[in-house]
Image (cartoon, rainbow, N blue to C red):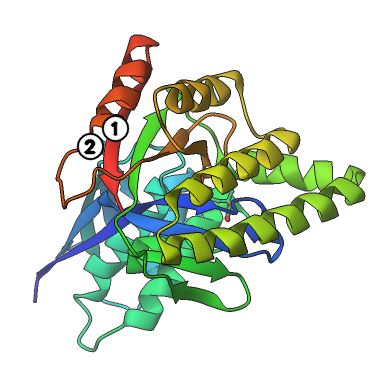
Amino acid sequence: MTEALGEASGKVILLGEHAVVYGAPALAAGIERGARARATRCSGASALRLGGRELRAAPAEEDVARAFAALLGALPDVGPVRVEAESDLPPGGGLGSSAALGVAIARSVAALAPAPAAAAVTDAAAAWERVFHGNPSGIDTTAAARGGCFRFTRAHGATSIAPRDDLWLCVGSTGVSSSTRIMVELVARLFERKPTLAATSIAGITALVENAALAIEAGDVVGLGRLMDLNQMLLAGMFVSTEAIEALCKLAREAGALGAKITGAGGGGSVIALLPPPGGGATSNVAADRVLAAWRDAGYSGFVTRV
Ligand code: PMV
């Protein structure tokens, strides 16, 4: 085979970001948007084409080139490859864009190997992600690789959760790109200085996550929305919220959302707003239209997705 394709989904974190880095559970779900890659055998050095630029795999170069080199190093050797990759997730948007790219690229390259290399794909995507994130919990690459709705811990990985009904979410963008690595470091410094805050935040978020898993399985969207709001309060207490995030959450609640919070690292990026389900197997949701209109009127963009 001289050419192979790979794809992976973006994700939202329903509850539990940041605490998950410290071993607490989190709930995440794949979304329809994601990343795609095409790997082709070539002569010369391996290269990655991304966002209109072509980069050689080089350990000492900029982040993307280093990440590509680390990813290739974790896969079975398939010789030089040229990979073209694209994502329809905003970078730094809290939607797992870099993890989705890492998994899609690793899948496309691994598909050129003579034997299946699924385990190596996970390692390669993790190696890619470490370049951007420093200390990733692994929830982003797990979501990119498996999609669906799941509970995740660092120690035990993912366990599927079956929502009783579809969850309808609006995803809103602050328009500000943020670095997960910087936000994770910021929380680490805060937790070092304030160990009591660390312990209460992690314990509080753990309780919310466990209750939210039950609410999702029971189809209790009103309860789930309240738990998301409480999680947002704890995240704000960890200083990862911003004025734009709070504005997006408030606008969504006023327009009828059942709950709203950061998804991902915060400091910018995206929020999710949980919507009342339309019922009767409908394929559109008037509550989503109201939330998106409220965001648009205030100068923010967003889209609707179903889990
Ligand atoms: O990559 P983001 O912005 O979706 O954030 C990932 C979630 C964090 O808990 C903040 C970091 C991690 O590695 O779990």
Q: Is residue 248 visible?
A: yes
Q: Quadrant of the N terminus?
A: bottom left
Circle 2 residue: 285
> Please, what is the three-letter code of the amino acid marked with disc 1?
Ala
Q: Is mark 1 on a helix, strand or loop?
A: helix
Q: In this orientation, which residue lies closer to the viewer: 56 or 106?
A: 106
Name the residue: 82% across, 41% down: 190
Q: How far apart are marks 2 and 1 (CA)?
A: 5 Å
Q: Which mark is residue 204?
A: none
Q: Which amino acid does label 2 sit on?
A: Asn
> Would you say the residues marked 2 and 1 are in contact, meaning their CB atoms lie under 8 Å apart?
yes
The quarter of the picture where residue 135 lies is bottom right
Q: Is residue 7 above or below residue 282?
A: below
Q: Which residue sits at x=71%, y=44%? A: 185
Q: Check disc 1: other Cα within 10 Å, few if <14, some if 14-19, many if 20+.
A: many
Residue 102 at what x, y percent from top left?
A: 37, 58
Q: Position of residue 177 (x, y in %)?
A: 47, 29
